[in-house]
């Protein structure tokens, strides 16, 4: 049996927890049956396909639950149905999730649409708009060159540079917003002129245009002096502008906002937001849910099979079935947590099989991170949820949802109705403060 460094290195890299899967990737696992029948193709795709008007929908779920992988599946599904789809992860190049406002998102959409569509539509309306603002913006773009003297390619590059500075140079961020914000309505107008032109010249085989803006769910909650949040500013105060682009739209949204007092306002503006739940590895009563556990193990098995197809997952990759099950259950059915735990356990392994000790060390390390996340007064809230399997509409619960200390699950009851329930992340169960909070309830 090979126990060499090369095999461990390949396994380690196969469990990269931060890389979404491309459509058709053989490592993909369909979790629909153990996520309460959640299917992005049905929940978002069908409405877009059938609507004779542009749509704007919100998609959410815990960070790391697999939303990007599902959105990329949706992109492929739509492309196969004559949609030209512009997909981008907003936090990779365009916005700072620690400090994001609506203007940042509009500029990000503009830059990405220019990048993806400039070969089929004239960017002139947007460049004329930028020309009209150039005296105010050229210092913020950090260039002394006069706009009219630039070639079109250079003008486009200046727009990209402006949005790059918005993300990368914090001291310029607020200045750029102050200059752009009074003109967002006119920017949308010229952007829509560009989109109309693009839709008239879509490549052969496409007749609709869609934009998917991913990773806005990673926005960190920021309150202003009046107690209003950047979530409200983006998704409610600017909802008309957010929906104003002349194409089909999908935005990811922080899950905590869908459990706020503004949830009904979101529904009125966008319709029912779709939430990607966890993979159910335990039942509401706390018993192991074998179909879910089997699916989680399939995630690991598919990645291992690409590298070491001849090795037994339960006895040669891991030292026992119990070690593998323990790791899978401790993930709580959260895909990224599963990959991170496996990734860290491999890092702590010198020779295969991965031992129970290596898995326990990875679990302890992850548990310590959760320990530091929870505030003193929140232990009692976690204890209550672990007993009731319900959450309350309160800022502290929303914070625990955002930090993935509380997880959402979904299942179909005997009548086919969808039921939601909530539980603490399994990593929290072993923390002394949580045990003490549970003891006080009994």
Image (tube, rainbow, N blue to C red):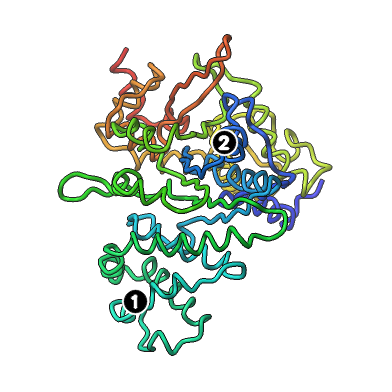
Compared across the picture, whether 257 is left or right of 359 comes to left
Q: Is residue 132 left or right of residue 21?
A: left
Instruction: Look at the numbered disc 1 and give the secondary structure of its residue.
Output: helix
The C terminus lies in which quarter of the figure?
top left
Q: Which residue is mark 1?
A: 132
Residue placed most toward the observer, 294 or 122:
122
x, y (%) of residue 409? 50, 26
For the point 30% across and 34% down, the residue is 262
**Disc 1: CA contacts within 10 A as few (<14), some (14-19) or many (>=20):** few
View extreme (top): residue: 414
- Name which quarter of the figure residue 166 lies in: bottom left
Question: Residue 388, located in which quarter of the rendered image?
Answer: top left
Q: Which residue lies at the image location 77% right of the left edge and 47% below the top edge?
A: 306
Q: Is residue 173 above or below residue 300?
A: below
Residue 162, how many percent across, how many down?
Answer: 39, 73
Q: Position of residue 428 (x, y in %)?
A: 42, 31
As helix, strand or loop, the secondary structure at mark 2 comes to: helix
Q: Residues within 10 Å of mark 2 (few under 14, many from 20)?
A: few
- Would you place residue 2 above or below residue 37 in this image? below
Q: Choose between 23 and 234: the one closer to the eye.
A: 234
Q: Position of residue 360 (x, y in %)?
A: 54, 37
Disc 2 versus disc 1: distance between alpha carbons?
39 Å
Residue at 64% x, 52% y is 207
Q: Nearer the viewer, residue 181 or 163?
A: 181
Q: Is residue 361 visible?
A: no
Q: Do the CB atoms of the residues marked 2 and 1 lie less than 8 Å apart?
A: no
Q: Which mark is residue 47?
A: 2
Residue plotted at (55% across, 21% down): 282
């Amino acid at each position: 049996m090979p126990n060499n460094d090369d095999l461990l290195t390949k396994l380690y890299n196969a469990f990269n927890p931060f890389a979404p899967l491309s459509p058709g990737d053989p490592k993909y696992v369909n979790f629909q049956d153990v996520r309460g029948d959640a299917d992005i193709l049905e929940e978002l795709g069908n409405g877009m396909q059938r609507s004779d008007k542009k749509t704007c929908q919100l998609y959410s779920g815990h960070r790391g639950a697999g939303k990007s992988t599902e959105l990329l599946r949706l992109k492929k599904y739509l492309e196969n149905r004559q949609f030209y789809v512009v997909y981008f992860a907003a936090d990779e190049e365009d916005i700072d999730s620690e400090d994001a406002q609506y203007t940042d998102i509009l500029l990000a959409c503009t830059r990405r649409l220019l990048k993806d569509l400039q070969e089929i539509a004239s960017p002139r309306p947007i460049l004329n708009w930028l020309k009209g603002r150039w005296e105010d913006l050229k210092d913020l773009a950090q260039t002394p060159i006069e706009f009219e003297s630039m070639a079109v390619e250079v003008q486009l590059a200046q727009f990209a540079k402006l949005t790059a500075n918005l993300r990368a140079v914090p001291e310029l961020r607020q200045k750029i917003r102050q200059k752009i914000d009074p003109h967002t309505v006119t920017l949308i107008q010229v952007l829509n002129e560009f989109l109309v032109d693009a839709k008239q010249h879509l490549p052969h085989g496409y007749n609709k245009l869609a934009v998917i803006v991913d990773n806005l769910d990673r926005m960190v909650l920021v309150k202003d002096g009046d107690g209003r949040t950047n979530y409200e500013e983006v998704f409610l105060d600017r909802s008309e502008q957010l929906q104003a682009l002349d194409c089909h739209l999908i935005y990811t949204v922080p899950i905590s906002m869908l459990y706020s007092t503004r949830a009904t306002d979101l529904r009125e503006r966008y319709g029912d937001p779709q939430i990607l739940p966890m993979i159910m590895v335990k039942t509401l009563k706390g018993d192991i849910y074998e179909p879910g556990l089997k699916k989680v193990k399939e995630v690991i098995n598919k990645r291992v099979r690409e590298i070491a197809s001849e090795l037994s997952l339960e006895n040669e990759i891991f030292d026992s079935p119990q070690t593998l099950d323990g790791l899978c259950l401790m993930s709580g059915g959260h895909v990224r947590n599963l990959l991170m735990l496996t990734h860290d356990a491999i890092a702590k392994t010198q020779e295969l099989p991965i031992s129970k000790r290596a898995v326990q060390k990875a679990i302890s390390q992850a548990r310590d991170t959760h320990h530091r996340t929870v505030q003193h007064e929140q232990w009692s809230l976690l204890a209550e949820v672990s007993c009731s399997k319900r959450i309350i509409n309160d800022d502290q619960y929303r914070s625990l949802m955002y930090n993935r200390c509380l997880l959402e699950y979904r299942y179909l009851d005997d009548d086919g109705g969808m039921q939601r329930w909530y539980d603490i992340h399994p990593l929290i169960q072993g923390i002394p403060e949580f045990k003490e909070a549970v003891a006080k309830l009994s």
